[in-house]
Image (cartoon, rainbow, N blue to C red):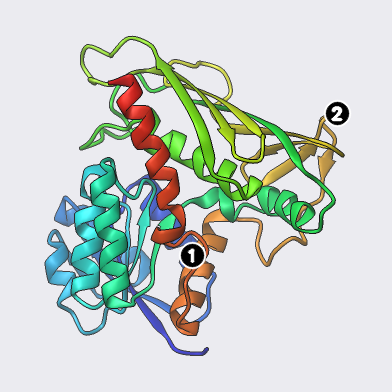
Amino acid sequence: MTQTIRIALAGPGAFGLKHLDALKNIAGVEVTSIIGRELPKAQEVAQKYGARHATTELDEALARPDVDAVILCTPTQLHAQQSIAAMKAGKHVQVEIPLCDRLEDGRAVVETQKKTGLVAMCGHTRRFNPSHQFVRKRIEAGEFHIHQMDVQTYFFRRTNMNALGQPRSWTDHLLWHHAAHTVDLFQYQTGSKVVQANAVQGPIHPDLGIAMDMSIQLKAENGAICTLSLSFNNEGPLGTFFRYIGDTATYIARYDDLFNGKEEKIDVSKVDVSMNGIELQDREFIAAIREQREPNASVAKVLPCYEVLARLERQLG
């Protein structure tokens, strides 16, 4: 339980930095390597966070004896192959959402985890946000049952820029990335698999090659429904906002904050040891390694989400 876990982080962009900030708050964790597309930037981040090694090559970091585990914040298209490479090198892995953008690749990651027995987890942060944890605890206590989830995922991203306003080397995707959060959370919170799924999308952007607007409907086996609206064209509040409509209450979750249906804030500060969902996600990854157990949001547990996304992609095709 006191074992120092030595971490390599690949992809020191906007989200990679969130993980590095979170890891500073977890005892017995040492960041030893930073892997980036541009060596000067990787070296700068390594110096800031005390990592002794920086490189542009993931394989170089995977070969190091001072790396026990890898956190992948790299482009979506690399997630599955890099996760498999990490496990084949004997390293535990946490890969940022999405696990894959092709279902067969996600299944290959799960198979590799089964063969190696290593911890392999995907960054489905909504499972860890205190707001959603509060709702989950009420569900588990039998005090709340979901009738409907109404979710809005809105950004203003008409050019290929990241959350820091820097150019991206890859293109984001409403279905495989952003819808993954909600599809997984809906099945997780209802405890029921999606049996009906429908999607429509707006025009394809002429430069980015992706749909900028999308609407998704889901129905779970237990009868609960979910309506998800996604857009890269929204100039209003940015982010993802969840409305839980249930038998005993209505909840509105905005990242780590929670409100009731009358917009009165609910105190979730005692739900877990932190109010930072990314930190709680990373704490689960480290704890699973130390305790040699399957983590919440393991690649096997989130795979049903990607099965739904693949069905939706076929519809949109």
At numbered mark 1, what does the secondary structure look like: helix, strand or loop?
helix
Q: Can you give x and y, in whole percent of width and height, for residue 276 in the image?
A: 60, 55
x and y percent of residue 131 in the render? 69, 48
Q: Which mark is residue 262?
A: 2
Q: How far is the residue under mark 1 from the one under mark 2?
A: 32 Å
Report if residue 314 is visible in the image: yes
Residue 164 visible to the viewer:
no
The answer to whether 125 appears left or right of 60 in the picture is right
- Mark 2 Cα-neighbour bin, 10 Å: few <14, some 14–19, many ≥20: few
- Secondary structure at badge 2 equals loop
Q: Amino acid at mark 1?
A: Asp
In terms of image quadrants, where is residue 108? bottom left
Q: Residue at x 84, y 37 (%)?
A: 247
Question: Where 241 falls versus 275 (above or below)?
Answer: above
Q: Earlier in the sequence, mark 1 or mark 2?
A: 2
Residue 119 spot, x, y in % from top left: 38, 72
Q: Nearer the viewer, residue 227 or 241?
A: 227
